[in-house]
Image (cartoon, rainbow, N blue to C red):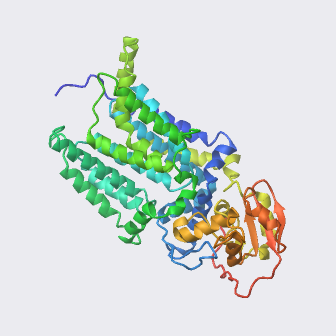
Amino acid sequence: MAEPEIEPIWWLPTFGFFLFLFLGLWMFFSPEAANSIFEDPGVGRHLRTAEVILETGLVPRTDPLSYTHAGEPWFDFEWGFETTIGELYRLGGLALVCAFGYGLFASAVLGVYRTLLQSGFSLTVVLLYTGLAFLTLHLHFAVRPLLFTYLFMALVVEVWNQRTVPLKRDWIILPIVFAAWANLHAGWLAALLFLGLAMFGRLIDRLTGQVDGDAAPLIPWIGLTLLCALATVLNPWGWTLHHHVVLLATTYKSFALWDEFLPPNFSTPTMSALAILFIVFVVFLTRACKNAPRWRAEALVPVLFFLFEGLKTQRHVLLLVIVAAVPVARDLEVLLHGTWMPFVRERLRDFQEQQRYSRIDAALALVVVLLFACLFGHTPLGQNIQVGKSVTPQLVSFLQAHPDRFHRPLTTTANAGPLLWNMRPAFRVSMDDRGDFYGDPAVFAFVDMDMGKGIAGSGEKTTWRTTLDQGNYDSAILDPYLPLNQLLHLQPDWHEVYRDDHAVVYWRDIPPHPFFFERPPFNGHRWP
């Protein structure tokens, strides 16, 4: 066997590690950098559910967060993520949760970098596409279980692209990953779809004579994919989880009300739209080159599927960027190929070979996460993290000063999560961001009420006032921009009692109705 031209240095960190280091340092830069990943409305809901899980020692089976659906069956398929951040909070507060979030995000970016590096692309291409992945993944950078999906998806894509057949360790590691993934987030379904589509494309390649069976085996990958799918049964609901996740991905129309589920905006391009344009531009421009690489179906089929999904929902563009990394980088390599400064290019190739042999990135990344977590918790930034910018300390003080006026508050999906966390433990909301739990009819009626749709006498079957009366609310905590604010000012039984830049609070003068819901006594404790 020929000796390698470059002597491997396994302990040499790659550029990817230094990118990981920079992303970890990012949270130390300013209060905005630390607080931004806690602004998503779902973060407060996840944190409050984490409290419930650790207080009871049980996975929630019924709703503990709202008074409108209290006690109704709830499918909390993200309980593993909530338990994780709950334990982190008990160990080191929100600072440790923040460091954990940054660590997951940076690891996903590092995973894309390592996949491209191990695929043999030039350092320019690796850094350019990793930069695109960073900017795109950053669109949904929050303390949410999606972070695990980006990380694990990068791992699955790397394994597929780097192996002719699965290694022995893949038969152990990937099923464990999928078993954990099934209790963290529903994104495991996307990974199984990727593997299935890639294998279908490989079958097409073999049938059309593009590759032979030795170069593109199918049986080992089919076996590994089935084993990974079987591993997802290791969850509190068994196969019922799969039915729920499929319904979640295909049936709920109210998800279109959330920005992340809207199509990319190409008129005033957002980052998701720019990512799609970049990928399409590179692919079509490369086709004009004489030495343009030919796309095999095993790469083309999954990329087309996730491109189609990304055009429908900008949230899926993040998965597209991960799935398309290797084939698009291969095209980008052709476009950026040059003959400038051969001596410098030769030295860069030698350096890149050393980078490719490195095996220390993961260990160094773990050390950095642990070090930054310890340091960040002792900084003023780590000690003053705010969950949800829509709920200010002033609003919390006002609500806490009048606890008897908020037994049945009308809350919005934007402020419900932050209120659940900042007003814990007894506070309950009318509706939060769990659209799959409340159902399309309730979500659409609720949003129509907030927007003041269906004015009485206009011929609408259900008016905003009908929905408001059916809720029997004793108060309201609304976002200032909602049209319902103007309508409540016209109602004699509703009065504005508090306002700031992020929230408006109303009280209802009519005494509570006898059948108003009474909150059950709280037997747990409030975390520090």
Please indicate whether residue 173 sits to the left or right of residue 378 in the image.
left
Please indicate whether residue 337 sits to the left or right of residue 91 in the image.
left
| Figure check: 256 above or below 12 | below
Q: Residue at x 68, y 67 (%)?
A: 454
Residue positioned most to the bottom: 514
Give coordinates of residue 314: x percent, y percent. 50, 48
Total marks placed: 0
Front one among 485 and 197: 485
Q: Quadrant of residue 357?
A: top left
Q: Quadrant of residue 125?
A: top left
Report the quarter where the N terminus lies. top left
Q: Can residue 316 be spotted in the picture?
A: no
Report the quarter where the C terminus lies. bottom right
Give coordinates of residue 254: x percent, y percent. 54, 62
Front one among 165 and 42: 42
Give coordinates of residue 93: x percent, y percent. 62, 57
Q: Can residue 192 be spotted in the picture?
A: yes
Please indicate whether residue 419 sits to the left or right of residue 289 in the image.
right
Q: Residue at x 55, y 65 (%)?
A: 435
| Figure check: 459 above or below 26 | below
Give coordinates of residue 84: x percent, y percent. 51, 60
